[in-house]
Amino acid sequence: MAHDEPSKSVPQTKLVIRNIGLLLSGDLANPILDADTVVAVGDRITAVGKEKDVDTSGATVTIDARGTALAPGLIDSHVHPVCGDWTPRQNQLGWIDSYLHGGVTTMVSAGEVHTPGRPKDIVGLKAMAIFAQRAFHAFRPGGVKIYAGAPVIEHGMVEDDFKELAAAGVKILGEVGLGSVKDGKTAHQMVSWARKYGIQSTIHTGGPSIPGSSLIDKDMVLETDADVIGHVNGGHTALPDDQIMALCERSTRALEIVHNGNERAGLLALRTAMELKQLDRVILGTDSPAGSGVQPLGILRMISLLSSLGGIPAEVAICLATGNTAKMRKLDCGLIAPGREASFVLMDKAQHSAGKNLLDSIQKGDLPGIGMVIIDGAVSAQRSRNTPPATAVPEVVT
Ligand SMILES: [Zn+2]
């Protein structure tokens, strides 16, 4: 379909990235690959392996990773874009481009809810969703892909509305609970209609985020049964611990932990998912822009938080922000494997980190330094202007 994903230009370039010191796959089942070279033709990965075993001939661009780590581009599962690279929430320009410098190559909208004068009538909310889907499909600040056009459900919507939205290219609902529908029965009906037409749903969880939003407790989350339990750790106000644990135990849906949530509750959700051996359900977002601002390094901060305080290996924490989210959000990025999108972040331990290498530095709570970000096989950013400086940075050699 023409509107499946944000637009991309696909020149038939051949990209070779060699001398990779650590290859992080994004795949929870096998997070570290025994390989040092990645090849991409156009916007797709074509080979991953040892340099001597892969065909590197005819490269149009060669990058010497200089022993740094390569991971899939990070995915932010929960953003609230509005229009272009501007957010009225903090009246800030260029926030998406700033996230690129935090390693984010893909964003998923949880509703364009900060739009000034956001329409709440049904034809208006549908028009806004279709507009946002089209606009972000065509506009990619710094190359970042933004999956947007996420309508917030309101009372009065009927099955035909979801059918019409799907036919127009809308693939996701904004957070259930941010509109007038605040009862599980109605929400469940609408989420089911959305699912029938291939539209994925996310529900707000916890106390109100800002004046005007409201409490969504575990009973409403369970009854609604949206595809993603949005900010299971609250945004910011979390549900009581027993309710968070009940959501982990009694639902099979994705458990989204966000930066702009309750950090203690985020660690509880992580621990509960681990005890259930369901870490594959955990995905990460920032829930930004928000009242607490924009966080260009938000996903990196989540990785560091969950690894250092949640006690999971750094390479596993990175999977939560890449392969896990891609699987739950049905995206073809997030994994280093042939056929997947050629979007990467190259990192090294930050200068003067006490960690002995990148993974150890993250496990000690430091942020990595980003040396390069690649989207669809093309270099989008070199040394990050936002992270602490990486010890070694990759180099474009041809
Ligand atoms: Zn929310």
Image (cartoon, rainbow, N blue to C red):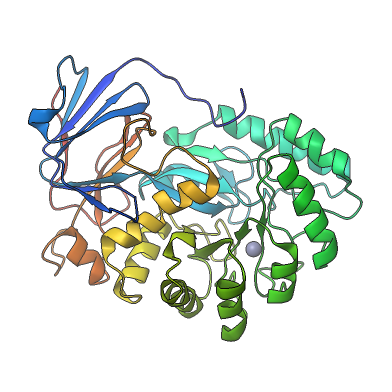
Image point (52%, 75%), residue name? 262
Judge left or right: residue 292 versus residue 171. Answer: left
Image point (44%, 42%), residue name? 97
The quarter of the rendered structure image containing the C terminus is: top left
Count the marks: 0
The quarter of the rendered structure image containing the N terminus is: top right
Judge left or right: residue 71 versus residue 107. Answer: left
* Residue furthest to the left: 52
Image point (29%, 73%), residue name? 308
Image point (80%, 52%), residue name? 190
Quarter, ligand 1 = bottom right
Q: Classify residue 137 by image quadrant.
A: top right
Asked if 294 appears above or below 307 in the picture, the reply is above
Residue 392 in the image: state x and y as whole percent: 13, 48
Q: Is residue 377 visible?
A: no
Residue 238 in the image: state x and y as whole percent: 59, 77
Judge left or right: residue 367 versus residue 240. Answer: left
Front position in the image: 280 or 85: 280
Residue 94 in the image: state x and y as whole percent: 48, 43
Asked if 176 appears above or below 60 in the picture, the reply is below
* Residue furthest to the right: 156
Residue 67 in the image: state x and y as whole percent: 11, 45
Q: Is residue 371 visible?
A: yes
